Amino acid sequence: MQMEGVKGVTMRMMVGRGDGAPNFAMRHFTVEPGGHTPHHRHDYEHEVFIVDGAGRVESDGEFHDIKAGDVLFVKANSVHQFVNQGAQPLEFLCLVPVTFDCGKTTPGSG
Amino acid sequence: MQMEGVKGVTMRMMVGRGDGAPNFAMRHFTVEPGGHTPHHRHDYEHEVFIVDGAGRVESDGEFHDIKAGDVLFVKANSVHQFVNQGAQPLEFLCLVPVTFDCGKTTPGSG
């Protein structure tokens, strides 16, 4: 991913609008050791499942260690970031609605 | 799960309406060896990630072997069933929209 505030992150679309997904999209992320997702917020939620590895997540100023098997619900408009400070890749699924805010197309849901 | 056509299946709600999920719900299923989900269809989609184990899925009369790491998109109204004919538990995430068919509450999304 080439995006401001992103380091060492790869995204794969697993099920998206292009597959005919009418309501929500499943994406697979890999965060390399030392990498992180953007420290940001947006007007739609995430539902996350940690597939492999470990790391740390921030949600509205609170930090939580995360590891394979954990599930996270990141509510709309909460500030969040995933950080991999470990030695193994961090892999997770992150699902988003395909639209938000009364019909706008969600970025990264295609 | 106590439901007609179900054998050896446990469901855990990971993120649902009760958590404030506005658009879709994440459920975790375990199918014991010899178990299966119902052979059915409904007017909403599934997005599925196989977490552990292996098994077989039917979709509209086609059969596919499934294993950990696989992703499935079960479109609305396709007949489907998950079967564990192996020796290990089959574990998967199955996500559904929280409403379908113009606002009806999706069963198992709470």
Image: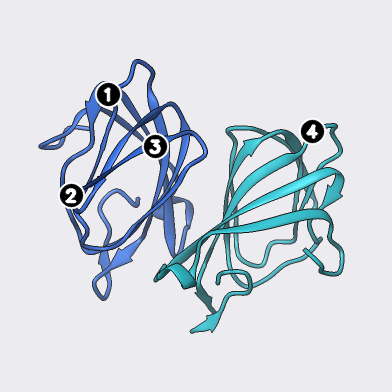
Chain colours: A cyan, B blue
- Of badges 3 and 4, nearer the viewer stands 3
Q: Residue furthest bottom?
A: A103
Which residue is under mark 1?
A: B85
Neighbours of disc 1 within 10 Å: few (<14), some (14-19), many (20+): some
Which of the pair B47/B3 is nearer the observer?
B47
Q: Chain of mark 2?
A: B
Q: Amino acid at mark 1?
A: Gln
Q: Is residue A61 above or below residue B50?
A: below
Residue indicated by mark 4: A88
Residue in the picture at 43% in, 59% down:
B24
In the rendered image, is residue A103 in sight?
yes
Q: Same chain for the residues at labels 3 and 4, yes or no?
A: no
Q: Amino acid at mark 3?
A: Ile
Pointers 3 and 4 in contact (CB under 8 A)? Answer: no
Q: Classify the position of the N terminus of chain A by image quarter.
A: bottom right
Instruction: Give the residue type at disc 4.
Output: Gln
Task: Assign a secondary structure to mark 1.
Answer: loop
How many angstroms separate mark 1 from mark 4 (CA)? 33 Å
Task: Kindly indicate whether the residues beneath marks 1 and 4 are on one polypeptide chain.
Answer: no
Q: Quadrant of residue A37?
A: bottom right
Residue carrying label 3: B66
Marks 2 and 3 belong to one chain: yes
Circle 2 SS class: loop
Q: Residue furthest top?
A: B87
Secondary-structure class at tag 4 = loop
| Mark drawn on residue B61 | 2
